[in-house]
Amino acid sequence: MNSTKITNYVVFGLAILSSLVAGLQVFAWTAFFTQEQTIAIMGGLSALGVMIKGWMSTAEAMARSIAAGVSAMQVEK
């Protein structure tokens, strides 16, 4: 398995995880928990969403950097 496939799988997995977190954020948690617990859950989900988006942008930036490095190496040869 090459690095491109691994990167694609990581990005797809993070996109799915991000979608799941977004879906959980619109769920009515107050039906099962107190208001304070609901606020804590929503805060945790928001923080998780921010971390996932940051991780995705880092992976995309690294992929662009690697692609630019590979194309630059091919030009030198």
Image (tube, rainbow, N blue to C red):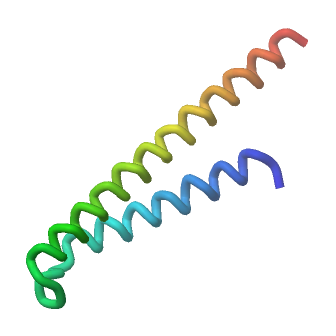
| Residue 13, above or below 50 | below
Residue drawn 81% across the image and 49% down it? 2
> Could you say where residue 62 lies in the image, as x and y percent from the top left?
61, 33
| Residue 72, above or below 29 | above
Q: How many marks?
A: 0
Query: Seen from this angle, which residue lies furthest right?
Result: 77
| Residue 51, above or below 24 | above
* Quarter holding residue 61: top right
| Residue 76, above or below 26 | above
* Quarter holding residue 68: top right
Residue drawn 72% across the image and 46% down it? 4
Residue nearest the viewer, comparing 66 with 39? 39
Residue drawn 64% across the image and 58% down it? 9
Residue drawn 55% across the image and 53% down it? 11
- Looking at the rendered image, the quarter that the N terminus falls into is bottom right
Relative horizontal placement of residue 57, taking residue 30 as reference (left or right): right
> Could you say where residue 17 lies in the image, as x and y percent from the top left?
45, 65
- Looking at the rendered image, the quarter that the C terminus falls into is top right
